[in-house]
Amino acid sequence: MKGRCHASVIAGRARRRSGTGAFGAEGAAGNGHVKDWRRTVGMFTDDPGMKELFAEAIKLREADRRKARRGQRRKPPAAS
């Protein structure tokens, strides 16, 4: 930001937030076509590669859970 005035920095931030910048509402190509994430829904349904990826992710998550549980100690029962 060195060499830029405060007003131009604020204007640049406003353009990015409003969607009028390089990757704003008109999309990355700038051709007026708005990209919508909903067009990807179902794209990878029943894809063997994605199923394998999810299976590996579940294995990693379970290993993390087992590791976390090993570190926990049970509190002794209250003496009342």
Image (tube, grey):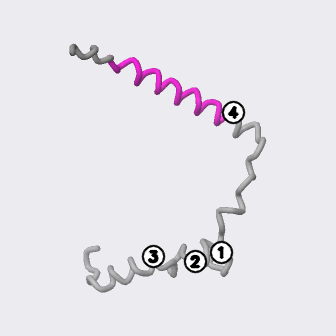
In front here: 74 or 6?
74
User: 43 or 2, which is in the foreground?
Assistant: 43
Q: Which residue is mark 2?
A: 25
Image-quadrant location for residue 79: top left
Q: Three-letter amino acid code at disc 1?
A: Val
Going from N to C along the chain, the mark reached first, 1 or 3, is: 3
Gap in angstroms between the C-alphas marked 4 and 2: 35 Å
* SS label for mark 3: helix
- The boundaries of the magenta stretch are 53-73
Residue 14, position as x, y percentages in the image? 40, 80
Task: Assign a secondary structure to mark 2.
Answer: loop
Q: Is residue 49 left or right of residue 16?
A: right
Sequence-wise, the earlier of marks 4 and 2 is 2
What is the CA distance from the residue labelled 2 to the residue labelled 1? 6 Å
Q: Give residue 52's mark.
A: 4
Question: Which residue of the protein is positioned furthest toward the front in this rendering?
Answer: 80
Q: Is residue 5 left or right of residue 38?
A: left
Q: Amino acid at mark 2?
A: Ala
Magenta region includes residue 36: no
Mark sitting earlier along the chain (2/1): 2
* Mark before the other along the chain sequence, 3 or 2: 3
